[in-house]
Image (cartoon, rainbow, N blue to C red):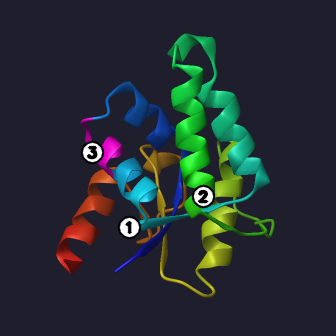
Amino acid sequence: MNYYAVLDTNVLVSALIRKESVPGAVVTHALEGKIIPLVNAEILEEYNDVLRRKKFKFDDQTVEVIIAGIISRAIHIDAVKTEEFFPDPTDAVFYEIVMESRKEHDAYLVTGNLKHFPQRTFIVTPREMLNIIELEE
């Protein structure tokens, strides 16, 4: 079974900091096709900008491989603006994409920052996403 999910940038950052981690397992599932990433140009731009920040010291080639892997498996969705309030306005696009995708798929938003988003059953932590996958197998 495949799962549709918007991956918040913090999940990618955590995965690159520590590959052998829960976020690392989520990203691995996305790169291997178990999780179908849901993206748009704005999300891909944020991935690229954040993962290349000097403070993280991620290798450029590693960043390129991760982003290219996500793009190769992703479904591109056009975001529909939401009226929800977000403490960080750059988080809105992640919510908009998952909401639009949920019109057709049982999609999730995977984030390490639940407090940045409205409380919804489909907005989950990386651990919760892995639990969902494990329950279905």
* Disc 3: which residue: 22
Task: Please say if 51 is above or below 3.
Answer: above
Query: Viewer-proximal residue, 109 or 61?
Result: 61
**Tag 3–tag 1 contact (CB < 8 Å):** no
| SS class, disc 1 | loop
Which residue position is annotated with label 2? Answer: 72
Q: Return the x and y of residue 134 as percentages of the image width and height.
A: 19, 69
**Residue 45 visible in this rendered orientation of the protein:** yes
- Residue at the spot of label 1: 34
Residue 66 percent coordinates (x, y): 52, 41
Query: Disc 2 vs disc 3: Cβ atoms closer than 8 Å?
Result: no
Residue range (magenta): 20-25
Q: Is 79 situated left or right of 1 in this image? A: right
Query: Could you tell me if residue 85 is visible in this image?
Result: no
Image vertical order of residue 59 relative to residue 35, above or below: above
x and y percentages locating residue 68 in the rendered image: 61, 46
What is the quadrant of the C terminus in the image? Answer: bottom left
In the image, what residue occupies the spot 54% across and 84% down? 105
- In the rendered picture of this protein, how many numbered marks are placed on residues? 3
Element type at mark 3: helix
> Viewer-proximal residue, 93 or 13?
13
